[in-house]
Image (spheres, grey):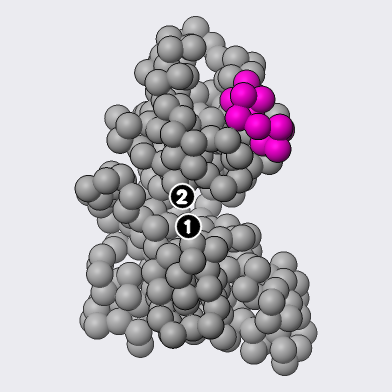
C-alpha cells in the first residue's frame, strides 16, 4: 500500500503519495509560513497532508530539520521553525489523520532514501552527506538508520577537524566541518559554490584554490568517517555537490590518503541521485521500512 511522505522545511512543505517502488503518485507543495509562528506553520503541515491524503495511504512519514528525537517523534527546537519547541509531531499527526506516523531528521531520511531507492541501492552500510547551507549526515547500518542511544547520532557536520580554528560554527564549537566547508564557507572565501564549477573549468585561479581548500578539508573529515564506519559507499548530495566531477574527482583522490582504512580507495564516493525528490522519498522511506 502507498504511504504519504512529508518534507517540512523552513520555507516550504512538500507532501506526496509514494508507492512501495518509490513512485511519487501525486504531490503538493505549500509555504511553511514559519515566520508567523508555530500554530500557523503546523496548520500548513496539516493542510499539505490533507491535500493529498488518500484512503489507501497506510502511514505517514515526516522528515524535518533537527534537533528532534526520532524515537519519540518530538521536534525539539529547530532554528528555522520558530516556536517549535518540544512538539510531539508524530503523535499530533497520528491523532489528526488516524494513521501511524513517524518523524525523522531530514538528513537521516535522505540517506535512507538513497539507500532504498537511489545511489546506494543494494548497499546496507552507507554514509550519506548533504553539502549545502550546512552539512548534514546520515548513517545507515545494516540497512537501517543508526540513531544512537538518545536519537542524536549522525550529526557529522559538527565533527571538529580543527579544534584551534578561529572559525566558530553556528552550534558554538570551533572548527566544525560545517563551518569550514559548507556553501557559505566557500562564499566567504570569495566565491559561492554555484559559480565554482564554471570558474574552475575556465581555469580561474581563485576558484581552483577555493575548491582545493574545500576538498582538502572534506577529505580530512571523510577520511575520519571512513576510518570510523568502513561504509560500503559514501553518497553526497546537496547544493555544493552540484559542483560535480571537479569536486568528486578531488575527493576520490584525496580521501584514501586521509584514513587508516586500507580499502578506502575502493570505497565509492558518488553523487546522490534523488535530487528534489529526496525529501518526500526520504519521509516515505522511514515508514516503508518500518
First in sequence: mark 2 vs mark 1 = 2
- Mark 2 surroundings: few (<14), some (14-19) or many (≥20) residues within 10 A: many
Q: Which residue is disc 2 drawn over?
A: 107
- Rendering coords of residue 112 (x, y %): 39, 45
Q: Which residue is disc 1 drawn over?
A: 136
The residue lying at 39 percent from left, 53 percent from top is 138
| Front-lying residue, 51 or 74 | 74
The quadrant the C terminus occupies is top left
The residue lying at 70 percent from left, 38 percent from top is 35
Secondary structure beneath label 1: strand
- Queried whether the magenta region covers residue 220, the answer comes back as no
Secondary structure beneath label 2: helix
- Above or below, 15 against 68 in this view is above
The residue lying at 49 percent from left, 36 percent from top is 85
- Rendering coords of residue 26 (x, y %): 61, 23
Dots 2 and 1: beta carbons under 8 Å?
yes
- Rendering coords of residue 61 (x, y %): 44, 29
Tell me the magenta residue range.
Answer: 31-44
Amino acid at each position: 500500500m502507498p504511504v504519504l511522505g512529508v518534507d517540512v522545511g523552513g520555507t516550504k512543505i512538500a507532501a506526496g503519495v509514494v508507492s512501495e517502488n518509490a513512485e511519487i503518485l501525486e504531490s503538493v507543495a505549500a509555504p511553511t509560513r514559519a515566520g508567523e509562528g508555530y500554530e500557523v506553520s503546523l496548520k500548513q503541515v496539516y493542510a499539505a497532508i490533507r491535500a493529498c491524503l488518500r484512503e489507501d495511504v497506510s502511514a505517514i512519514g515526516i522528515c524535518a530539520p533537527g534537533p528532534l528525537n526520532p524515537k519519540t517523534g518530538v521536534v525539539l527546537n529547530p532554528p528555522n521553525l520558530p516556536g517549535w519547541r518540544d512538539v510531539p509531531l508524530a503523535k499530533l499527526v497520528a491523532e489528526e489523520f488516524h494513521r501511524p506516523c513517524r518523524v525523522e531528521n531530514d538528513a537521516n531520511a535522505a540517506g535512507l532514501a538513497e539507500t532504498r531507492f537511489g545511489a546506494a541501492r543494494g548497499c546496507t552500510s552507507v554514509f550519506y552527506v548533504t553539502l549545502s547551507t550546512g552539512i548534514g549526515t546520515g548513517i545507515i547500518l545494516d540497512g537501517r538508520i543508526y540513531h544512537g542511544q538518545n536519537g542524536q547520532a549522525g550529526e557529522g557536520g559538527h565533527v571538529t577537524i580543527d579544534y584551534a580554528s578561529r572559525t566558530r560554527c553556528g552550534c558554538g564549537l570551533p572548527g566544525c566541518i560545517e563551518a569550514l566547508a559548507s556553501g557559505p564557507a566557500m562564499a566567504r572565501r570569495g566565491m559561492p559554490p554555484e559559480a565554482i564549477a564554471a570558474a574552475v573549468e575556465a581555469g580561474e585561479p581563485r576558484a581552483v584554490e577555493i575548491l582545493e581548500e574545500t576538498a582538502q578539508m572534506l577529505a580530512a573529515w571523510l577520511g575520519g568517517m571512513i576510518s570510523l564506519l568502513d561504509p560500503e559507499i559514501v553518497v553526497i548530495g546537496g547544493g555544493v555537490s552540484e559542483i560535480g566531477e571537479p569536486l568528486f574527482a578531488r575527493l576520490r583522490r584525496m580521501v584514501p590518503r586521509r584514513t587508516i582504512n586500507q580499502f578506502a580507495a575502493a570505497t565509492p564516493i558518488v553523487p546522490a541521485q534523488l535530487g528534489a525528490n529526496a525529501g518526500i522519498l526520504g519521509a516515505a522511506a522511514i515508514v516503508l521500512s518500518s
